[in-house]
Amino acid sequence: MDNVIWLIDDDASVRESLVFLFTGMNWHVEPYDSIAAFTAAQSGEKSLTGCLLLDMRMPGKGGLAWLEEGAWPWPLLPVILMTGHGTIDACRRAFHNGVFEFFTKPLDADTLIESITAALAESQRRLGVWQEATRVRARFEQLTTREHEVLLALMEGSSNKEVAARLNLSPRTVEAHRAAVFVKLGVSSLVQAIREYDKLQSV
């Protein structure tokens, strides 16, 4: 779902007030009272989009501790961290762990809406990059092992003759592999092939 606000806060009054605010913006809100409830509902889902509004301190596991556990499983989902106990160190740790924004309660509605609007746009940007990388990856997976070796050698700046010598092939065979690579990647030049390859490194 696009433009979903995933809200995690153990305080029912905070959840209710934020749900009221966001529904007035025609945003779909999915509120949860704990990280455990959220992760159970999203088990196995890696492509969540929207924005996660997360409380830093909650009974059991808090938002900041969760972010510090390791690799974030939802790369398309920007996180806005909120807390009633903000410190400079907490803010530093939050941004070090990739949060999109950090707010101290009580929340200013206009500022929060502005930040969430930006986070939703960022999520869509990330989704576009991810979808493009997925498309490109599918094309690269069509390459044979030999075609991939030829492409990597060409990307390093080697000529057809140099690639042929390195891989113990004839120059004509290298040229045939090069042509097959271009067809499978949907490109017409080595420069375009390199650009496609670079897209895989951006996600």
Image (cartoon, rainbow, N blue to C red):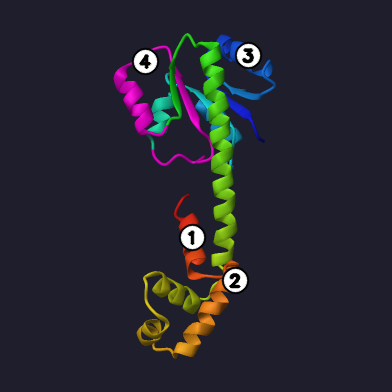
Please provide the residue range marked out in magenta: 70-98
Tag 4–tag 1 contact (CB < 8 Å): no
Which mark lies nearer to you, 2 or 1? 1
Residue under numbered circle 2? 184
Residues at marks 2 and 3, CA–CA distance in whole angstroms:
49 Å
- The answer to if 127 sits in the magenta stretch is no
Residue under numbered circle 4? 86
Tag 2–tag 3 contact (CB < 8 Å): no
How far across and how far down the image is residue 47, in percent?
58, 43
Residue under numbered circle 1? 195
Within 10 angstroms of label 4, few (less than 14), some, or many (20 or more) residues?
Answer: some
The amino acid type found where label 3 is placed reads: Leu
- The answer to if 81 sits in the magenta stretch is yes
Could you say which quadrant of the image residue 38 lies in?
A: top right
| Disc nearer the start of the sequence (3/1) | 3
The amino acid type found where label 2 is placed reads: Lys
The amino acid type found where label 1 is placed reads: Arg
How far across and how far down the image is residue 56, in percent?
43, 21
| Disc nearer the start of the sequence (4/2) | 4
Q: 155 and 19: which one is in front? A: 155
Residue under numbered circle 3? 21
The amino acid type found where label 4 is placed reads: Gly
| Disc nearer the start of the sequence (3/4) | 3
Residue drawn at x 59%, y 71% as measured from the top left: 184
